[in-house]
Image (cartoon, rainbow, N blue to C red):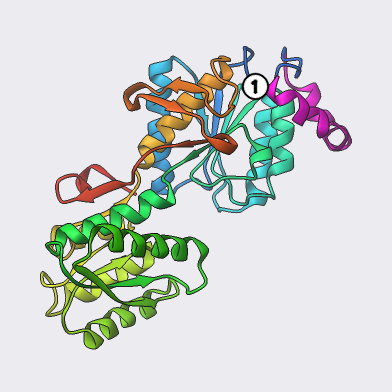
Amino acid sequence: MKFQSRRVATLAAVTLVAGLSLTACGGDDGEDGGSGGGDSSVTMLPKNLGNPYFDTSTAGAEKAAGELDAEIEEVGPDTASPEAQVPFINTAAQQGVGGLIVSANDPEAICDALTEAMDAGASVVTFDSDTNPECRDLFINQASAEGIAKVQVDLIAEQIGGSGEIAILSAAANATNQNAWIEMMEAELEANHPDIELVDTVYGDDDDQKSFDQTAALLQAHPDLKGIISPTTVGISAAARYLSDSEYKGKVALTGLGTPNQMREYVENGTVEAFALWNPGDLGYLAMYATQALIDGDIEGEEGDTFDAGDLGEYTVGADGEVLLGDPFVFNAENIGDFDF
């Protein structure tokens, strides 16, 4: 069985600290992992409660649970910290739930608790924010780095008519994910948009005022600039605020990664035509279907496993137990009213 070796390997540590979880798992003997029977109820643990983003994820998971005739309960702390998540994981393990869906506040800090939950028979699926692969069965990844880079280039290309000068307003200069996206965007521009010139990349350090000021500086330094990509939610909202009250509104395009609640005003007033992120509702929906597939024993979380995810279709488990939701979601004037996060 897939989970057998991992759980044996962690048995010594678990025995020291997890007597409670091992004795509180009801009728599950802990030998068959999270698959193939037992309690089918699912606990959903976002980073914190009261966060519109995660409210949307939970709504998606609840929709899937309704379709699957499954039970799901959302629990979570008020503040987004790994320490605050651990008691909820322990409680779920003690209750003997069949599945646990978690957005991790730390890749390492909640691993012991998640391992105990798996030893107690729960299938553990992370979404939005992953743990180390050893600490869960599957990770529902919202988008690939390649997909995130491509959608932003495609959006700016469409908005500026396929040619002209653009710039990037990033977060910190040493931000690993931002730099990876920028590198991929440069490659995408070179390969498929030869008439678009990336003339500058600046950094707002995910500080609202600095991002605002960097936007102004970009427009002064590059009077022929036709568009800005900001692959950071702080940067795109600050840049939109600057453009919205400037002479550049409607003349310089802006896109990137943002949330509907941040960007609604600027989409509705015509400053921003479209931007991207992912649909957290779909993310929760897919996480619930994946968890149920593990609980039912339809999959074991191995690379190549396939499962049905209702309205989203069929999905395949990739390397390291990752399941990719798909391409980033594009928000525009036609659909932004459908979201609240």
Identify the magenta region: 1-26
Q: Position of residue 319 (x, y in %)?
A: 56, 37
Q: Is residue 161 visible?
A: yes
Quick one: SS at disc 1? loop
Q: Quadrant of the N terminus?
A: top right
Kindly identify which residue carries mark 1: 34
Residue at the (56%, 42%) spot, across then down: 76
| Image position of 22 with respect to 235: above or below | above
Front residue of 332/220: it is 220
Relative placement, left or right, of 179 versus 107 is left
Query: What residue is drawn where x is 68% and y is 45%?
Result: 110
Give the amino acid at mark 1: Gly
* Image: 149 above or below 279: below
Q: Is residue 160 magenta?
A: no
* In the displayed structure image, the side of residue 35 where residue 185 appears, left or right: left
Q: Main secondary structure of the magenta part?
A: helix
